[in-house]
Image: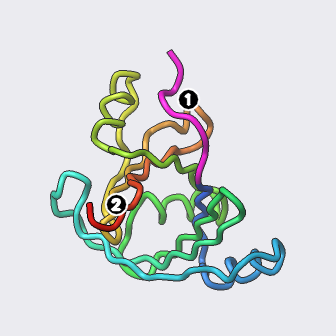
Amino acid sequence: MGFPFQGINQLGFVVKDATDIATRQQILFDCDSPVIMEAEVKENLWEQAIPPYKIKIAFLTLGELQLEFIQVLDGTPKIYTDFLVQCGEGLHHVGINVPNLRKALDGVSDEGIKVLWSGTIYSVPFTYLDTQQRFGTIIELIELRPPNPLGT
């Protein structure tokens, strides 16, 4: 059985300076300015407390593809800090948007794929899957639902 999702929506990079890299990429690709935000993650997908950490995230949109640049500001989220130590700056994960993360995780657990890391940023749940050995990179599932039409 194959991986139960199609399409890559995001390329996620761990970097030392998200603003600088995103600005240089914006110039390179001649696209709209990056959206830059800071976020604090305090709990995992299952609402269990984790050691809090702060990150800066810069997003660029290239057509249907989003580039995400992640910079650790405070704390030691091992998923990012270990990557920087072991690999330096670079591609960390590929992201796939899903309408229901818990349901999606049921599908990947049937494939024997485990969760590496999870959290919620600005009410958007995400999880990184232990897919490095199987697929050559970490896969992130991001729960993005279409907005409700007005009045519903």
How far across and how far down the image is residue 138, in percent?
53, 45
Secondary structure of the residue carrying numbered label 2: loop
Q: Which residue is the site of mark 2?
A: 148
Query: Which span of residues is magenta-colored?
Result: 1-9
Q: Which residue is the site of mark 1?
A: 134
**Residue found 56% across the figure and 63% down from its top:** 85
Q: Quadrant of residue 13?
A: bottom right
How far across and how far down the image is residue 137, in percent?
59, 43
What's the residue type where badge 2 is placed?
Answer: Asn
How far across and how far down the image is residue 11, in percent?
62, 56
Q: Is residue 52 above or below residue 99?
A: below
For this orientation, the residue located farthest to the top is: 1
Q: Quadrant of residue 40?
A: bottom left
Q: Residues within 10 Å of mark 1 (few under 14, many from 20)?
A: few
Query: Is residue 5 part of the magenta span, yes or no?
Result: yes
Where does the C terminus fall, quadrant-wise? Answer: bottom left
What's the residue type where badge 1 is placed?
Answer: Arg
Query: Is residue 72 part of the magenta span, yes or no?
Result: no
Residue 46 falls left or right of residue 28: left
Q: In front: 7, or 89?
A: 7
Reading the chain from its start, which is encountered first: label 1 or label 2? 1
Q: Is residue 54 above or below residue 3?
A: below
Q: CA distance from mark 1 to mark 2?
A: 36 Å
Residue 148 falls left or right of residue 135: left
Image marks 1 and 2: residues in contact by CB distance under 8 Å: no
Q: Is residue 59 above or below residue 142?
A: below
How far across and how far down the image is residue 12, in percent?
58, 59
Q: Examine the residues drawn in magenta and state their main secondary structure.
A: loop
**Residue found 36% across the figure and 28% down from its top:** 107
* Coloration of the structure image: rainbow
